[in-house]
Amino acid sequence: MDLRDYDIAELKGVGPAVREKLSKLGIETYQDLLFHLPFRYEDRTRIMPTASISAGQSAQILVKVEHAEIAFGRRRSLVCRASDNTGSVDLRFFYFSKAQKDKLTKGQWILCFGDVSRGSGRATMIHPEIKYVNDPSRPPLDNCLTPVYPVTDGVKQHSLRKLLQQVLQRLPKTNLEELLPDTVKQTLGVDDLKASLQFIHNPPPGTDLVDLIGGEHPAKRRLIVEELIAFNLSMLRLREKIVREPAIALPPSTQLRPRLLELLPFQLTSAQVKVGEEISHDLNQPHPMLRLVQGDVGSGKTLVAAMAALQAIEQGYQVALMAPTEILAEQHWNNFSGWLGELDIECAFLVSKLRASERRQMLESIESGSAQMIIGTHALFQDAVNFQNLALVIIDEQHRFGVHQRLSLKEKGRHSHGVPHQLIMTATPIPRTLAMTAYADLDTSIIDELPPGRKPVQTLVMPDTKRHQVVHRVASACQEQGVQAYWVCTLIEESEELQCQAAEVTAEQLAEAMPHLSVGLVHGRMKPFDKQAIMEQFKAGDIDLLVATTVIEVGVDVPNASLMVIENPERLGLAQLHQLRGRVGRGAIESHCVLLYHSPLSQNGRARLETMRETNDGFKIAEKDLELRGPGEVLGTRQTGIAELKIADVMRDRLLIPQLQQSAKLMHQQYPQLAEKLVIRWLGTREVYGSV
């Protein structure tokens, strides 16, 4: 029988209650248990002298009790002083029994494993695991490294290890199906699967943990390869499922697009033309377009999206554009209604803060089809919204939504002719490594060229002790050179209300320090209309200095704004800092961004600010962001699939990804049955990013 056919209820120690708890971890069969992999290891195969242990590490020591007593400080605790022939250590227990204290008698040898910290000038272990030793010449050491597994409430490490050992003992006599075809194994040069699993769950003493954790060990590499192929196969299946559906073939625009281009006071860049042609070709196919357009801040993605929209509108269909925030939706509304209004195309705007009468009017125009271009936030996929004939969905800043959300909007556009085409835009450059995995269901276009005349923004990093000098320089630049400036207040409190209060205080202080300047304020608690009015004044030049929270991160285009100060930039991620900086440098004037940090900086904070100072390249910044924060954070919390990999790591294993993608495509096309089993082995029956 195959390992998939054995239920874990057959294992010793698994009753109905334990089985239910294990199912929360996705463990129902022997195979599930075998592929529940360790995320780190503890070395209990050797003893370390107490003199060599240091804070921050885990260690196993063999020591003799000197004395144990109950200490009464801020918290009652049991403190045991113990030593070997190299030094002494304190063991501290906040939860203990009288029996435990009585067993820690003077002269008793104990084997301790735990995390080391520093307390009262000596090495300390808090709540170490203890074994009482009768013969210190023969301590009970483990014969392999101890794996540490993901667990859930009611399932302890010790229990999980015992269950796994039962399965591993039966592994040589049971069938574990080899799901990688011979051609793939030969190409990738991978080891035997059974041997790799035995090794991963029971690494022998002396195993190089750096190699093992770092993914260099052949046993771990074998499993990394399988998991990444399975992940890519899942994305290929998701894409195939979507493109298998019909869509309306939309011929290239011969009237509206040329008219729009005539209205523009500038020429398209060659990158915009190229990406526009790729989109136009996709829209003319009888299956849904799935295309991701990446472009740095200011590269002209919105105009490319407008040209795509006109291709659908010219054929009499509707287009929906969904943005993650109301301020970005408003910016798109201004751009699209300006461009399309000149072409007599009706635009609708749908966000949650509309008055009831405005909302009713918008819903009616969307349902009747009179509104051909619909712009909004997540309000677009609420139940009350009914499109008449939606043919194209444009999603801005995809990483702010879950894939299931864009698929929900696709479902709202389903009609007798099929499903809408999808165009995804992002100004947050996604590292190629991540795009090849997390967005494997999308074709990718990159607008890798900025409009002519743009100069890179000069970035300065300064401590906030020099705030007074920065205020003076801002006042001088605005008054004497006629430039406009942003002063960005970053997240100070968890409460949005307190953030806005802090921004208000900053605006008052700056207005007092610069009485000759007009100081404006915009923050997230303002009504959309009031926010827009302030932004219009700033754009018109009526406001010299705009104090803002990070609501101005995206979608604001003021060419005369050439100076930005960001307070406490260490609180923001690289992608957000890059987006904010992109608000300046949009004209021909040389622009500057001052990062006014508060000491002391963490190691990560220092690395982020140095990266901002060194480069304006969005893709380099994105790679560094991925390195510092990991894929789950870079993609956004809703994009969980890539962050839940069991043993692979897209940053660490990025060099493998192109080759593994090819292997996944080969299996998808030539070995569909094996591919199906491989996806189930690693991902279960769940879709990577939610249901289609």
Image (tube, rainbow, N blue to C red):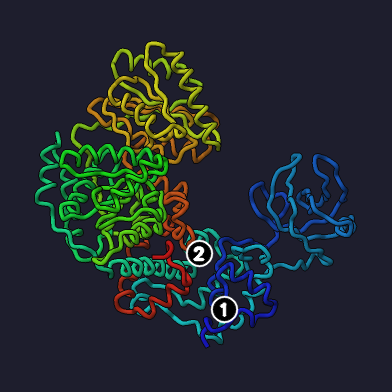
Q: As displayed, is residue 622 above or below residue 215?
A: above
Q: Is residue 479 left or right of residue 468?
A: left
Q: Are marks 1 and 2 in contact (CB under 8 Å)?
A: no
Q: Is residue 332 left or right of residue 630?
A: left
- Closest to the observer: 224 or 76? 76
Residue 366 picture location, percent across and down: 29, 50
Q: Is residue 96 left or right of residue 420?
A: right
Look at mark 1 in the image and give the residue it sits on.
30
Secondary structure type for disc 2:
loop
Secondary structure type for disc 1:
helix
Q: As displayed, is residue 592 above or below residue 89?
A: above
Instruction: Determine crowd level at label 1: few under 14, some 14-19, many 20+ residues with C-alpha closer than 10 A.
Output: many
Q: Is residue 690 left or right of residue 52?
A: left
Q: At 36% across and 53% down in the image, what residue appears?
A: 385
Look at mark 2 in the image and give the residue it sits on.
646
Q: At 46% across and 62% down in the image, what residue appears?
A: 648
Marked residue nearer the N-terminal end (1 or 2): 1
Instruction: Determine crowd level at label 2: few under 14, some 14-19, many 20+ residues with C-alpha closer than 10 A.
Output: some
Q: Quadrant of residue 325?
A: top left
Q: As displayed, is residue 42 above or below residue 244?
A: above
Residue 684, numbered label: none
- Closest to the observer: 287 or 175? 287
Amino acid at the residue labelled 1: Tyr
Amino acid at the residue labelled 2: Lys
Residue 24 shows in this picture: yes
Residue 661 picture location, percent across and down: 33, 66
Residue 619 shows in this picture: no
- Closest to the observer: 339 or 481? 339
Q: As displayed, is residue 519 above or below residue 22?
A: above
